[in-house]
Image: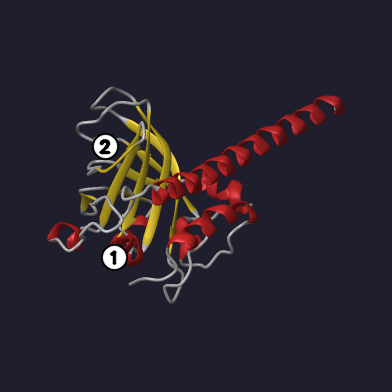
Amino acid sequence: MKRSVSVFLLSGACLLYGAENSDVERLNRAAEVFQEVMNAPDKGIPQDLLDKSECVVIVPGLKKAAFVVGGKFGRGFFSCRTRGGHGWSGPAAVRVEGGSFGFQIGGSETDVIMLVMNRRGAERLLSSKFTLGADASVAAGPVGRTASAETDAYMTAEILTYSRARGLFAGIALSGATLREDLDSNEALYGKKLTNKDIIEGGAAAPPAAAQFVSTLNKYSTRRG
């Protein structure tokens, strides 16, 4: 009996450890995706838009259920500006479900980056669930480090979205996608149940596992323009 209990506890610990590892790997991959995009000469996110953003969402390896048009599913993380606009918060976890990219060039997985451009968009992001294009206005973001961002679409959209598949990075309007907070991933990273609002507005200290993610965001933007 004691042996059975020990085996059960060990198995549970291994499953928990595996879940934690998976979340840390995804978090580090999100940091790598952002760095690769920002390092691409003349192909990244315009610096002025990044500096004006309130939050950044990164979903590495969003999976497609069908070619060109179909269901999507992915898990990622986002961070928002800390009070005063300098530096970035610890990461909060999200799940992305559904939505359509419209025309795509193919590829089984797509990396997605979203810039949340104003406070209203950030408030939507902190809710337990919201839909792009319905609960928050969304537009395809411009590409190129010096691309002009002074257009009505970019100035009024709450969220600008980008995707990268097979090396091609482009602005894509990800309308219809639903974002939900991922409480299980938050618990795996922080060691306790935290909502995204607890993390972002509650000022939860970023866990050691988030060091690469936060430092990468700080590397490319430390203040708003």
Q: Which residue in the structure is indicated by mark 1?
A: 118
Q: Secondary structure at mark 2?
A: loop
Q: Identify which amino acid the numbered label 1 is placed on.
A: Asn
Quadrant housing the N terminus: top right
Mark 1 touches mark 2? (CB < 8 Å): no
Q: Quadrant of residue 150?
A: bottom left
Q: Residue at x 46, y 67 (%)?
A: 201
Q: Is residue 137 left or right of residue 30?
A: left
**x then y, percent, for residue 136:** 24, 54
User: How many numbered discs?
Assistant: 2
Q: Secondary structure at mark 1?
A: loop
User: Is residue 224 shown above or below 14?
Assistant: below
Q: Is residue 146 left or right of residue 41?
A: left
Q: Residues within 10 Å of mark 1 (few under 14, many from 20)?
A: some
In the image, 122 versus 84, the foreground residue is 84
Q: Residue furthest left?
A: 152
User: Is residue 150 shown above or below 71?
Assistant: below
**x then y, percent, for residue 26:** 52, 41
Residue 192, visible in the rendered structure: no
Q: Residue at x 25, y 48 (%)?
A: 132
Q: Residue at x 36, y 49 (%)?
A: 41
**x then y, percent, for residue 91:** 50, 55
Residue 194, visible in the rendered structure: yes
N-terminal of the pair, mark 1 or mark 2, is: 2
Q: CA distance from mark 1 to mark 2?
A: 22 Å
Q: Residue at x 33, y 24 (%)?
A: 65
Q: Which residue in the structure is indicated by mark 2?
A: 99
Q: Identify which amino acid the numbered label 2 is placed on.
A: Gly
